[in-house]
Amino acid sequence: MIEISVIIPVYNVPLEYLRACFDSLVTQTMQECEFIVVSDGASDVECSICEEYRIKDSRLKFFRRKHAGVSATRNYGIEQAHGKYITFVDSDDWLDENALAILYSLIKHSDADIVLADAEKMWQDGRKERLVNLKKEKKKLKLTNIPAFTVWCYAFRTSVITERNIRFPENLRYSEDRAFIYHYCCFCRCIATTSDVVYFYRQHELSACRNNQSIDHVAQQFMAASLIGDILKKYSVLPPFAICKIKNRIARMGMKIYLKNHSMVVNALSLEKLFCDEVSSSKLNFLYCLVLSKIAAVLESFFKV
């Protein structure tokens, strides 16, 4: 019986990283799992590596699709999954060999609606940094205090995903993880976490997080804020002021990154229009978010965060 399905989109990843990712999958100590590898219009060379590992390990299933983006690819993977739980891996990252065993043990001992393990950011020069610094605990899940917004350290109940029709928004290129997690957590009572590091998040020049300093990225973050606000309103899980705070926080993420390399004064009008169209019509709210974003951008640049 398959307990955990791991969904891995593949597109335009350095081949050595792809092999390292697959090596970490096929050496997983847990056997009651499957690896749903989905080509998102990947090259022939990438696909040949996928086929190679499919032959090597019967737990790995490989599917080819035309390029449609990471959200559509993950959604397709969800449709193919047979496990009781689902997690995700990016094809340029890798897992600890006991990652799935640790997640599954956490599931069985906690009976939580969602479980989360820790991760490390890994740089090419050997530096590393804990992503969340979690404790081993089970607690009530608060939508205003979700500990992480990357789907690859979580394990989600497949039944909740399918019954509630939770999917990644295919119109977003950024913060699609955040939208998925908020949607899922609307139906969660408790979360279990562990301090164990199970996931290694590779930092390199092709990483999406290193290519998000354009005005388009800001617009995408504002769209994500609007979508998440609509989800939270639909299920009446938070009061309006709390939803507003969450939307503002997401909007500030996009503005902070943009303002690290762009003038606040020169770009204020274009940012205001986008903000008022998607996040809030209040100009005072926009100015509040703009100033906080600029302060955060200056502090991060100063301390080189």
Image (spheres, grey):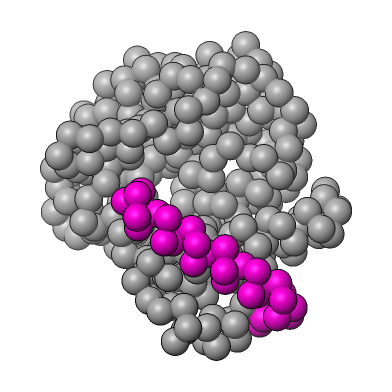
State whether the magenta stretch is mostly helix, strand or loop: helix
74 or 105, nearer to the observer: 105
User: Residue at image x 31%, y 51%?
Assistant: 304
Q: Is residue 27 above or below residue 238?
A: above
Name the residue rendered at 31%, 64% in the picture.
211
Residue 146 inside the magenta-drawn segment: no
Decide if residue 196 is on the left or right side of residue 49. right
The image position of residue 56, as x and y in percent, is 21, 29
Q: Toward the viewer: 144 or 287? A: 287
Q: Give x and y (percent) for residue 199.
A: 37, 31
Image quadrant where residue 122 sits: top left
Q: Is residue 42 left or right of residue 263?
A: left
Q: Quadrant of residue 288?
A: bottom right
Q: Which of 29 and 149 lies nearest the eye of the viewer?
A: 149
- Front residue of 7/222: it is 222
Task: Examine the rendering and report whether any part of residue 108 can be seen.
Answer: yes
Magenta-colored span: 276-305
- Return the x and y of residue 95 as percentages of the image width and height: 33, 29
Residue 60 is left or right of residue 110, and the answer is left
Q: Residue at x 72, y 43 (%)?
A: 143
Q: Is residue 94 visible?
A: no
Work out whether 236 lies above or below 230: above
Q: What residue is drawn where x is 41% and y is 61%? A: 298
Count of numbered labels shown in the rendering? 0
Q: Left or right: 276 with respect to 254?
A: right
Above or below 71: residue 186: above
Query: Where residue 192 appears, x then y in whole percent?
Result: 62, 23
